[in-house]
Image (tube, helix red, strand yellow):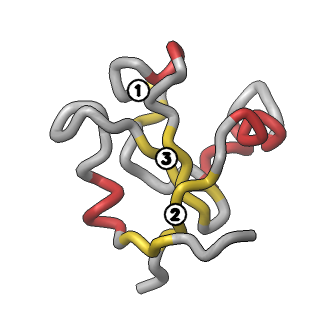
Amino acid sequence: MEQLTQYSKAQLALRNGQDKPDVWIAYKGLIYDVTSSRLWRTGNHYEHWAGQDLTDELKDAPHTESVFEKFKPIGRLKVD
């Protein structure tokens, strides 16, 4: 995998579809740009909010992690 830029949780939080037009989510340390997804258009998808690490929330979703295959990782989440 190519070298990905690291982003802090604070930087990720700004990409919530409200503060900036970008809609990003993190999963298992990777950050995905989901701006193009109609399901994330407003910055939320059901009870999940963009700009966050959704790793722990996937177990409650009606789909598997294969949903992330639709999106190219654009960065890595910095570990605090």
Query: Image height check: is 74 above or below 51?
Result: below
Residue 10 x, y percent position in the rendering: 26, 65
Q: Residue type at mark 1?
A: Asn
Query: Image height check: is 50 above or below 35?
Result: below
Residue 75 x, y percent position in the rendering: 52, 63
Mark 1 residue element: strand
Q: What residue do we see at 36% from left, 28% from top?
A: 43
Quadrant of the image for the C terminus? bottom left
Quick check: 75 left or right of 7? right
Between the residue at mark 2 and the residue at mark 1, the CA separation in whole angstroms equals: 20 Å
Question: Residue 29 occupies which quadrant of the picture?
Answer: bottom right
Density class for disc 2 (Cα within 10 Å; few <14, some 14-19, many ≥20) is: many
Task: Name the front one of labels 3 and 2.
Answer: 2
Query: Image height check: is 7 above or below 34?
Result: below
Residue 75, label in figure:
2
Label 3 sits on residue: 25
Quadrant of the image for the N terminus? bottom right
Q: Could one spot residue 46 in this view of the protein?
A: no
Density class for disc 1 (Cα within 10 Å; few <14, some 14-19, many ≥20) is: some
Q: What residue do we see at 66% from left, 39% from top?
A: 71
Task: Name the front one of labels 2 and 1.
Answer: 2
Q: Residue type at mark 3?
A: Ile
Q: Nearer the viewer, residue 70 or 56?
A: 70
Callout 2–callout 1 Cβ contact below 8 Å: no
Label 1 sits on residue: 44
Q: What residue do we see at 66% from left, 63% from top?
A: 28
Residue 76, label in figure:
none
Between the residue at mark 1 and the residue at mark 3, the CA separation in whole angstroms equals: 10 Å
